[in-house]
Image (cartoon, rainbow, N blue to C red):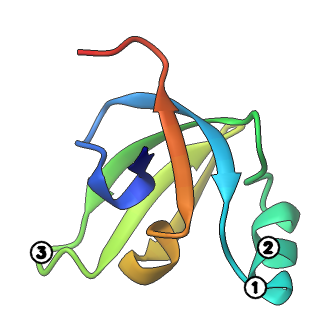
Amino acid sequence: MKTLDSLPVGVAAVITCIDAGEELKQRFFSFGVRRGSEISVKALSATKATIEIEVGGTMIALRREEAKTIQVSLVCPL
């Protein structure tokens, strides 16, 4: 299974599972990051420590460690 941190910039995917603690899941949920949502990586920081994503028209920056907890399935596999 792919995780969000492994997606290349510009690739769309659907969230299949979030394997995080309840507090982090609630924070994700408040941003619209939930199972079944379409998500794409828009940019990476120079050190690749943070990932900028788009979900539901909203841009969000996540730490790489947070992105590793989000499992995804490619919308249109390469």
- Dot label at residue 25: 2
Image-quadrant location for residue 1: top left
For the point 36% across and 46% down, the residue is 42
Q: CA distance from mark 3 to mark 2?
A: 26 Å
**Quick one: label 3 or label 2, which is nearer the N terminus?**
2
Q: CA distance from mark 1 to mark 2?
A: 6 Å
Q: CA distance from mark 3 to mark 1?
A: 28 Å
- Where residue 71 sits in the image (x, y, percent)? 54, 51
- Where residue 17 sits in the image (x, y, percent)? 68, 51
Element under label 1?
Answer: loop
Element under label 2?
Answer: helix
- Where residue 76 sits in the image (x, y, percent)? 40, 11
* Dot 1 crowding, Cα within 10 Å, few <14, some 14–19, many 20+: few
Which residue is under mark 3? 46
Lateral position of residue 28 relative to residue 41, left or right = right
C-beta proximity under 8 Å, tags 1 and 2: yes
**Callout 1 amino acid:** Gly
Furthest residue in direction left, as rendered: 46
- Dot label at residue 21: 1
Lateral position of residue 17 relative to residue 64, left or right = right
Labels 3, 2: front one: 2
For the point 13% across and 81% down, the residue is 47
